[in-house]
């Protein structure tokens, strides 16, 4: 996983364009075909957020091919003491454990920050593939909240999966591997 350095917008734009139908059901930002300009802005914002410690976005580089195959990140959305993990993986690279490996690494990093005691993964109830990631990692389903559905595949019922520092020690030593 690599932090954005500033020159990734062209590759990111090509990747999102190839994956639009795969992402559109679940990611509100995938409603329109991506533009280079919009992704340049996105990359710039992720770097600003990183500097301001309010978000830590990464792109996934596949060792074997050297290609960008998805993105994952930590976001400060849940408020003090918690971070949220998000992820997406290119359709031609799903079911290789990439989302699970990314979420595992990000959870370990987040819970290693002294001020963070909880990590969350939010996903729509209908997004079976996404929900299986926290499930496999030993997160527990804390609650389901009714929200506005922002993407066409969503029901609006958001599952909030949670793991805390104590549980994570156990789940990383004996939990499932991708
Ligand atoms: C959800 C997503 C990130 C999963 O990525 P991934 O790299 O395939 O996930 P993993 O390989 O780590 O898969 C973990 C498990 O998820 C489940 N899973 C993955 N894709 C699935 C699918 N299409 N249907 C049912 N289960 C699925 C499987 O149990 C899988 O394990 P298995 O392959 O050993 O059976 C990917 O499908 C994606 O990018 N979807 C579109 C964007 C999105 O929904 N992002 C999350 C928003 S909350």
Image: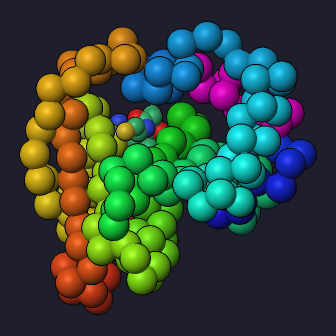
- The residue at the point 60 percent across, 61 percent down is 53
In the rendering, at what x and y percent does residue 77 appear? Answer: 40, 47
Question: Which quarter of the picture shows residue 133?
Answer: bottom left
Q: Between residue 177 and residue 46, name the one nearer to us.
A: 46
**Residue positioned most to the right:** 7
Rendering coords of residue 109 (x, y %): 48, 75
Up-down: is 167 above or below 178? Answer: below
- Residue found 27% across the figure and 86% down from its top: 169
Of 93 and 70, the residue lying toward us: 70
- Can residue 55 be spotted in the picture? yes
Name the side, left or right, on which 110 lies relative to 173.
Answer: right
Image height of 85 relative to 11, above or below: below
Q: Residue at x 77, y 31 (%)?
A: 41
Q: Bounds of the magenta span?
A: 9-20
Near-viewer residue (80 or 142): 80
Indicate the quadrant of ligand 1 in the picture: top left
Asked if residue 16 lies in the magenta stretch, the reply is: yes
Count of numbered tags = 0
Magenta span dominant secondary structure: helix
Q: Is residue 61 above or below residue 148?
A: below
- Quadrant occupied by the N terminus: bottom right
- In this view, 119 is above or below 94: below
x, y percentage for residue 72?
Answer: 54, 51
Residue 124, given in percent of the width and then of the height, sits at 25, 32
From the viewer's perspective, tell me whether residue 144 is left or right of residue 138.
left
* Residue at horizontal 13 percent and vertical 53 percent from the top: 141
């Amino acid at each position: 996983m690599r932090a954005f350095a500033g020159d990734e917008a062209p590759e990111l734009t090509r990747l999102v364009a190839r994956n639009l139908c795969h992402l559109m059901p679940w990611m509100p930002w995938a409603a329109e075909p991506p533009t280079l300009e919009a992704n340049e802005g996105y990359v710039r914002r992720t770097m600003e957020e990183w500097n301001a410690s309010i978000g830590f976005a990464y792109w996934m580089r596949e060792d074997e091919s050297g290609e960008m195959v998805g993105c994952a990140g930590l976001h400060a959305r849940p408020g003090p003491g918690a971070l949220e993990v998000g992820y997406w993986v290119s359709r031609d690279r799903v079911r290789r454990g990439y989302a699970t490996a990314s979420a595992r690494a990000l959870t370990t990093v987040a819970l290693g920050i002294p001020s963070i005691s909880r990590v969350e993964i939010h996903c729509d109830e209908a997004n079976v593939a996404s929900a299986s990631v926290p499930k496999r990692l030993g997160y527990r389903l804390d609650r389901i909240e009714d929200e506005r559905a922002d993407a066409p595949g969503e029901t609006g019922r958001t599952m909030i999966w949670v793991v805390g520092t104590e549980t994570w020690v156990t789940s990383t030593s004996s939990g499932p591997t991708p």
